[in-house]
Amino acid sequence: MAIRDMAFLVVINFLWGLNFIAVKLAVEDLPPLLANALRFTVVLVLLLPWLKIVTGRMKDLLLVAFTLGFLHFGTVFVAMSLAEHISAVAIAAQLNVPFATLLAVLFLGEQVGWKRVAGIALSFAGVVLLGFDPRVFAYLDALALVVFSALVYAVAAILMRRLHAVRATTTQAWVAVAGVSGSALLSMMMESGQAAALAGADWVPFVAVVYSGVASSIIGHGGVNYLLRKYEVSVISPYLLLMPLFAIINGIVFLGETLTLRMVIGGALTLLGVAIVTLRNSRRSVRLERDILEQEQ
């Protein structure tokens, strides 16, 4: 990988890590579902030129959009409104990697060796250990929601395999449509005081929402989609492990968070397990690609 692209991946991970701060700031003054709707309003406005009907693919496209824009991100915003600290949340969010591997085994018939099984077990054990930390125990509901959002993201990743021919910006635009419509509707049904929150908020939550839409969705996800056109998934995925580390550092620097020993151990176990699964998935991907090339020759 070119040094420039490696540096870009580091920047993307930093932006994603900082996004946890942005979401936390947004939901402190705004109802979470409303904040998610506003975030995707920003994305939709910027990606409106790419919002197009894709003949024959709309069923799959709308399913991915609903799963990501509404279920996954909506759950993340609600979880962040309940969590007192972002470190445990950022770590638990990484469970999407072992979840995706398990779903691939269950629904795609993929085989896993003992190393990936051990990595999956380590990652879940780490999150369980996080849950028993006295500080995290106070917001176990937030941790459970983040784990659920990781499962939803893994489902979306499996579903997105059907959308190889669809332009990434078009997919993101439809994700924004689902995020705006679904979150706004559910906000009207389940939340209250939206108008008062909007009128009484200062500039911070609005800047946070704009940052989340532009930096996390447009630059972050758009950047990864751009790099995936140049490199294989197996090359890109290991670098994404930097995100929770940046989130933890940003939480300490900007929110004054402190880490307990149990959080450090639980986080280390989770990230080690995710790293093992990611690297083994990458090696498996390289091996499959090599086998396909040999068969074609």
Image: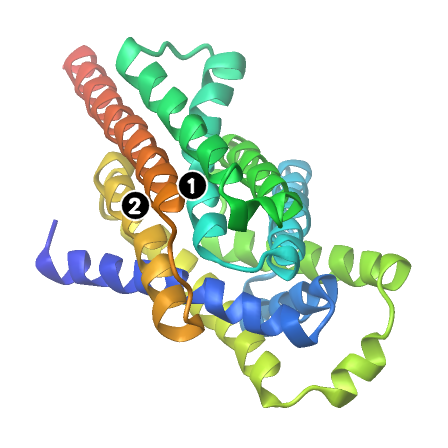
Give the x, y percent position of residue 80: 60, 58
Q: Quadrant of residue 190?
A: bottom right
Instruction: Tell me which amino acid carries mark 2.
Output: Leu
Instruction: Tell me which amino acid carries mark 1.
Output: Gln
Q: In the shown orientation, is residue 86 left or right of residue 278?
A: right
* Residue bearing the label numbered 1: 94
Q: In the shown orientation, is residue 87 left or right of residue 230?
A: right
What is the C-alpha distance between the residues marked 2 and 1?
8 Å
Q: Residue at x 41, y 71 (%)?
A: 256
Foreground pick, 202 / 254: 254
Q: Residue at x 48, y 15 (%)?
A: 108
Q: Quadrant of residue 231?
A: top left
**Where is the C terminus found, in terms of image quarters?**
top left
Give the x, y percent position of residue 31: 74, 68
Residue 55 in view here? no
Give the x, y percent position of residue 107: 54, 15
Most distant residue in the right direction: 189
Residue 287 lies, with reference to residue 207, above or below; the image says: above
User: SS of the residue at dot 2?
Assistant: helix
Foreground pick, 266 / 23: 266
Residue 241, numbered label:
2
